[in-house]
Amino acid sequence: QVQLVESGGGLVQPGGSLRLSCTTSIKFFDIFAMDWAWYRQAPGKQRELVALIYSRGATNYADSVKGRFTVSRNNDLYSVYLQMDSLKPEDTAVYYCYLDTHRGGYWGQGTQVTVSS
């Protein structure tokens, strides 16, 4: 069974930084061909797409995080990362990683990010 294990969430002050990590439990031989994404869900709101990184490295970001968040991947480590800088209180949410294998999709368990003074 595929599991995505996330880490790196926590409490940070406005203007601070956090780095989220997500690793798959299965070492897919074709991980290089898969796409990763980060989503987030704030209390009372729908889950929203934060960032995408495609198999060849192209990226897309939600307008609300452009210039502040950076998504990256390491195929050798079967991992995706989300570097979050200049954090704002409105970034507070549970963050989920998502792996699109093109044969099916898998979600991480979620990690809480709280931005507060």
Image (tube, rainbow, N blue to C red):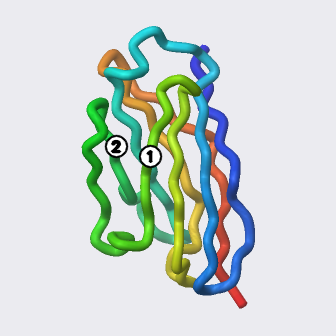
Question: Can you say which quadrant of the picture contains the N terminus?
Answer: top right
Identify the image quadrant of residue 6. top right
Q: Earlier in the sequence, mark 1 or mark 2?
A: 2
Q: Secondary structure at mark 2?
A: strand
Report, in whole angstroms, how far the alpha carbon at label 1 lies from the one at label 2.
Answer: 7 Å
Q: Secondary structure at mark 1?
A: strand
From the image, tell me which residue sits under label 1.
Answer: 72
Residue depicted at x 38% and y 71%: 65
Residue depicted at x 49% and y 13%: 28
Crowding at mark 2 (Cα within 10 Å: few <14, some 14-19, many 20+): many
Question: Can you say which quadrant of the picture contains the C terminus?
Answer: bottom right
Query: Quick check: marks 1 and 2 in contact, CB under 8 Å?
Result: yes
Position of residue 55 measured from the top left corner of the image (x, y, whole percent) = 30, 30
The three-letter code of the residue at mark 1 reads Ser
Position of residue 49 measured from the top left corner of the image (x, y, whole percent) = 36, 56
Identify which residue, 82 or 46, lies in the foreground. Answer: 82
Residue depicted at x 37% and y 29%: 100
The three-letter code of the residue at mark 2 reads Ile
Position of residue 76 measured from the top left corner of the image (x, y, whole percent) = 53, 23
Q: Residue furthest top?
A: 29
Q: Judge depth for marks 1 and 2 and give the one in front.
A: 1
Position of residue 95 measured from the top left corner of the image (x, y, whole percent) = 56, 56
From the image, tell me which residue sits under label 2.
Answer: 53
